[in-house]
Image: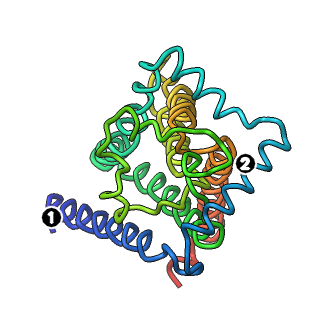
């Protein structure tokens, strides 16, 4: 079998995995709760109460100040929210698949474990986006200032509207940040730190996630890396298990 054929088959396998993961993401919506939207709003209020009790319900103040004083920043964060997510994820996956298959397999496994953990939480503890929760004054800045096609009602069939916690947006950015930190040379490694930092402010300033959503996402990212490292260590200690 030629290298090109093997690469084509590997690419087809990866595409199939991604499509399967997306189907699983869609099928798990409402699997436990009959009215996920209503439960998501109730749980969202719980997140609000917890952050208020802990003293860091800062998102409404951040957004209000930005809208009143630097609206261009809010619009910029709208685009950051969109452009630095799927486009960067797909580009990074493509480049890594071509350049370093071993690293690609490692980070892909981290992402899939991360997604599995997130889906479990989405099913059992759905949480609405902050802008949908009545007790806080937050705009859906993307729908308010554009680009309005993103996250519109027409798109709601393609994603889970009650999957704010953990924030996959932040969690996967942390995973990519680790990749960039470990892969880029010299000062370019700082992109690995700036990327999740920028994403954090994008997801909160746009009203799409609470700070606790990001904390949960970052924690899940760390857990996912730990699981993969543990699996690797187990395989290295007991290589014969794979051949029996």
Residue at position x 45%, y 23% in the image = 185
Residue under label 2: 48
Badge 2 crowding class, 10 Å Cα cut-off, few under 14, some 14 to 19, many 20 or more, is many
Residue under label 1: 5
Question: Does residue 199 lie above or below 42 as drawn?
Answer: above
Residue at position x 30%, y 42% in the image = 91
Question: Does residue 85 lie above or below 37 as drawn?
Answer: above
Question: Does residue 61 lie above or below 137 as drawn?
Answer: above
**Tag nearer the camera, 1 or 2:** 2
Q: Helix, strand, or loop for circle 1?
A: helix
**From mark 1 to mark 2, how far is it between C-alphas?**
53 Å
Quarter location, residue 43: bottom right
Q: Helix, strand, or loop for circle 2?
A: helix
Toward the bottom, the furthest residue is 244
- Quadrant showing the N terminus: bottom left
Badge 1 crowding class, 10 Å Cα cut-off, few under 14, some 14 to 19, many 20 or more, is few
On the image, the x and y values in percent for residue 153 come to 35, 57
| Relative side of 11 to 234, left or right | left
On the image, the x and y values in percent for residue 59 come to 64, 34
On the image, the x and y values in percent for residue 159 come to 40, 61
Q: Give the number of the disc on residue 139.
A: none
Between residues 149 and 104, which one lies in front from this camera angle? 149
Quarter location, residue 65: top right
Dot 1 or dot 2: first in sequence order is: 1
Question: Does residue 34 lie above or below 40 as drawn?
Answer: below
Between residues 221 and 182, which one lies in front from this camera angle? 221
| Relative side of 124 to 114, left or right | right
Residue at position x 41%, y 52% in the image = 102
Marks 1 & 2, CB-CB < 8 Å contact: no
């Amino acid at each position: 079998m030629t290298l090109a054929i093997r690469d084509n088959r590997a690419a087809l396998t990866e595409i199939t995995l991604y499509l399967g993961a997306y189907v699983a993401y869609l099928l798990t919506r409402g699997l436990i709760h009959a009215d996920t939207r209503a439960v998501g709003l109730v749980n969202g209020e719980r997140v609000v109460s917890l952050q208020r009790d802990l003293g860091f319900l800062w998102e409404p103040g951040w957004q209000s100040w930005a809208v009143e004083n630097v609206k261009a920043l809010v619009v910029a964060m709208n685009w950051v929210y969109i452009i630095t997510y799927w486009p960067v994820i797909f580009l990074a996956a493509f480049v890594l698949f071509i350049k370093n298959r071993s690293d690609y397999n490692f980070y892909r496994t981290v992402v899939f474990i991360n997604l599995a953990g997130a889906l479990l939480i989405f099913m059992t503890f759905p949480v609405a986006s902050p802008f949908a929760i009545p007790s806080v004054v937050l705009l859906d800045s993307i729908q308010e200032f554009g680009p309005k096609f993103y996250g519109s009602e027409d798109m709601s069939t393609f994603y889970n509207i009650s999957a704010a916690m953990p924030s996959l947006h932040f969690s996967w950015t942390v995973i990519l940040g680790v990749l960039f930190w470990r892969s880029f040379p010299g000062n370019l490694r700082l992109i690995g730190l700036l990327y999740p930092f920028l994403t954090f402010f994008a997801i909160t300033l746009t009203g799409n996630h609470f700070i606790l959503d990001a904390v949960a996402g970052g924690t899940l990212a760390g857990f996912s890396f730990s699981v993969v490292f543990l699996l690797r260590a187990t395989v290295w200690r007991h290589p014969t298990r794979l051949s029996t």
